[in-house]
Image (cartoon, grey):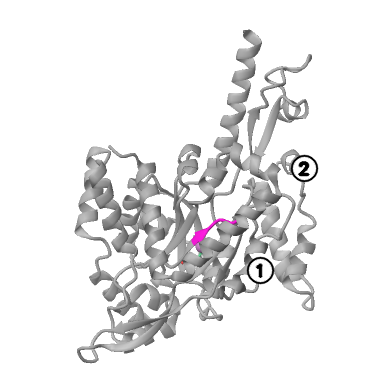
Amino acid sequence: MIGADEIRARFARAMSEMYRQEVPQYGALTELVARVNAQVLRDDPALKARLEATGALARLDVERHGAIRLGTAAELATMRRLFAVMGMAPVGYYDLSVAGIPVHSTAFRPVDEAALGRNPFRVFTSLLRLDLIADVALRAEAERILAARRIFTPGVLALIGQWEAEGGLGDAQADRFVREALETFRWHREATVSAATYRRLHDAHRLIADVVCFKGPHINHLTPRTLDIDAAQAEMPLYGMRAKDVIEGPPRRACPILLRQTSFAALEEPILFLGAGDAGEDGRHTARFGEIEQRGMALTPKGRALYDRLLRVARDDGPEDVPYGARLERAFARFPDTEDELRGQDLAYFRYDLTGGASLPPGLSAEAPIGDLVRFGVVVATPITYEDFLPVSAAGIFRSNLGGSGGAEYAASADRAGFEAALGAEVLDECALYAALQDRSIADVRQCLRDATAA
Ligand code: OOG
Ligand code: NI
C-alpha cells in the first residue's frame, strides 16, 4: 500500500509538470523563486539553520499551492473525497462575497506536522455561489449547464471508491490515481457553450463564465514559496512578468507573520466556442496566472484580531495622499515585531523543544511556566508556520485576475453552513490545529523534563 503522503507528493509533482507545460511562465517563476531563495539562504545562515532544524528547508523546493473553482455541491463533495486519498482535509472557511466575489472557499491541505513536512501541497478550493446571482433566468441556465458536466473520470471515481473501501492503493493504482485525477485539473480550450452564452455569463461576472463554460475546474495557478517576496517581486519584470502593484497581506517585518502574496496578470488564451460551424468560433479567455507567496508565523485569535484591525486601518483610515504601502507600514508599527513580544503577548503560536544542553536550574520544575523555561534556556521556542490563507488577500488575488473591476456588488453574506452541507463535512478550524501543535510540544517538553528529573 502506498501512503497518502506519497500519493500527494506524486500528485503535486505531476501537477507542477502539467502546469509548466500549460503555462511556461510558471516554469520561469519557479526558477526565479529558486534563485531568490538560494540567495537568502546564503545571506542568512541563522535562518537557514532554523529552517533546517524545523524541516522547512527540505520541503521548500516542492512547496506549492494551487487554486480551483467548482460549480456544484456534488463537485465539491467528490473533490473532498479525492483529496482525502492524498491526506488533504478541508481547513477553514473563506467568505469572499464581502469583496464582491460570488464564491466561498476552503483550503484542502495536510494537517499534521509530519505530513506537512513531507509535502505541504494545498489547494484553495472555491464554490461558485449562484444564489448570489440576481438574474433568475441566468442562474437557471448556469445550473443547467453545470448539471450536465462530469469533471471526474470514471477511473478516478472507481479508485476513490476502492481507497474508501480498502483504506489504501497499491503502487500502480496510486500512479493511475494521479494520472486520472490530473485530468480534472487540465486546461481545455474547447468551451462547452456558445459564444453568446459565454458572453451573457461573462457579463454577469467573469468568474461565472470561468466556472460554468468549461469541461472542468482547470487549475488556475500554482504558487511556489519564496523566502523574500520583495526581492522576488522586484525581479519579476526581468522575467517579462507584470506583477500586481501591491503585495497582499502584512508589510515586510523582522518577524514575518501570516502570508504575503503577489501575482502576475492572467494570460489571455485562445478558446473555441460550441456551435458556429464545424470549426467553432474563436474566442479568448483569461483565467490562469502566476503567484508567489512568503509564509510567516501563525497568529493566535488575539494576534489575528489585531492583524485584521490594522489592515482595516491601513485600507480605510489612511490618508488618501499616502501610498498604500506606506499606510500599511504605519498601521503595523503597532504590531509587536520581536519573537519575545509576540510570544509574551500571546499573539503567535510557537512550538517548544528542549535545548538539550541545559538542565533544570535550581528552583525551576518541569511544571514551571513555559516562558520561564525559555528564559532560563531550558527550552527553545520556534514560531509555527502559517499554513492557511487570508480572505482579504485572496479577494485581492481574485480581483487582480478578473481584469481590474470585480464587477458586481453582493450583499455580504457568509454561508458556512451551506458550504459545509455542500462539502458533506465540517471544515477544520485552523487555530485549533496550531493550538494543538503548540500544546503537544509543551506537554512533550514537560514529560521529558519530568523523566530526566526522576532518572
Ligand atoms: C483563488 C484566489 C485565492 C490565494 O492564494 O489566496 C488564492 C482563485 O483565484 O481561484 O489563490
Ligand atoms: Ni493563490
Q: Is residue 405 above or below residue 370?
A: below
Residue nearer the viewer, 212 or 117: 117
- x and y percentages locating residue 186 in the rendered image: 33, 66
Q: Type of residue at label 2?
A: Glu
The disc placed on residue 341 is 2
Was residue 224 drawn as part of the magenta stretch in this picture? Answer: yes
Mark 1–mark 2 Cα distance, whole angstroms, equals 31 Å
Residue nearer the viewer, 305 or 344: 344
Q: Write the start and end of the magenta stretch as one range.
A: 223-227
Was residue 251 drawn as part of the magenta stretch in this picture? Answer: no
- x and y percentages locating residue 404 in the rendered image: 56, 80
Q: Is residue 276 above or below residue 8?
A: below
Image quadrant in which the C terminus is located:
top right
Can residue 390 be seen?
A: no
Residue 276: which quarter of the image?
A: bottom left
Q: Earlier in the sequence, mark 1 or mark 2?
A: 1
Kindly state the secondary structure of the residue where label 2 is placed: helix
| Residue 43 horizontal side relative to residue 105, left or right | right
| Residue 158 horizontal side relative to residue 129, left or right | left
Q: Examine the residues drawn in magenta and state their main secondary structure.
A: loop
Q: Residue at x 46, y 56 (%)?
A: 106
Which residue bears the numbered disc 1?
234
